[in-house]
Amino acid sequence: SIPKRSTMLKQIWLSVKSTPLYSLLPTVTEYMVEKGWTKCFANIEEVGWPIYIFYTLVYVILVEFGTYWAHRELHDIKPLYKYVHAAHHKYNKEDDLSPFA
């Protein structure tokens, strides 16, 4: 079934409200690159394929590990769940699912 228009508008508004949070990580990482606190390689040839693959694997493992534990803590710390994370689970029923959920 297709969700009600009002439900989809609420989902869109929730996405809009969360945009600043989602834009924080790329903003911080870009700032770190600009300050020289970390390296950013424009071409794989600058580091070579073995190191590039290694860095990619380390990155994916760290991101997945961090995402898992951040999500778990959002469930375990009750005030965080109630005021921050509950909206994430509000629209997961069949009648509420849309591309904006």
Image (cartoon, rainbow, N blue to C red):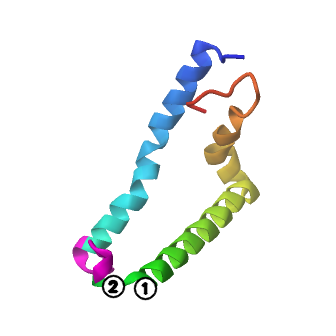
Which residue shows up at 68% across the image and 31% down it?
91
Q: Residue furthest top?
A: 5
Q: Which residue is mark 2?
A: 47
Q: Which residue is mark 1?
A: 51
**Would you place residue 14 above or below residue 59 in this image?**
above
Relative placement, left or right, of 66 versus 16 is right
Which residue shows up at 38% across the image and 60% down it?
26
| Amino acid type at image mark 1 | Ile
Q: x and y percent of residue 27 in the render?
A: 34, 59
Badge 1 vs badge 2, beta-carbon distance below 8 Å: yes
| Amino acid type at image mark 2 | Val
User: What secondary structure predominates along the stretch shown in magenta?
Assistant: loop
Q: x and y percent of residue 10 in the render?
A: 56, 25
Magenta part of the chain: 34-45
Secondary structure at numbered mark 2: loop
Which class describes the residues within 10 Å of circle 2: few (<14), some (14-19), or many (20+)?
Answer: few
Which class describes the residues within 10 Å of circle 1: few (<14), some (14-19), or many (20+)?
Answer: few
| Viewer-closest of 65 and 79 | 65
Quarter of the figure that contains the N terminus: top right
* Measured Cα–Cα span from mark 1 to mark 2: 6 Å
| Viewer-closest of 73 and 15 | 15
**Would you place residue 69 above or below residue 21 in this image?**
below
Image mark for residue 37: none
Which residue shows up at 73% across the image and 54% down it?
75
Q: x and y percent of residue 45 in the render?
A: 29, 80
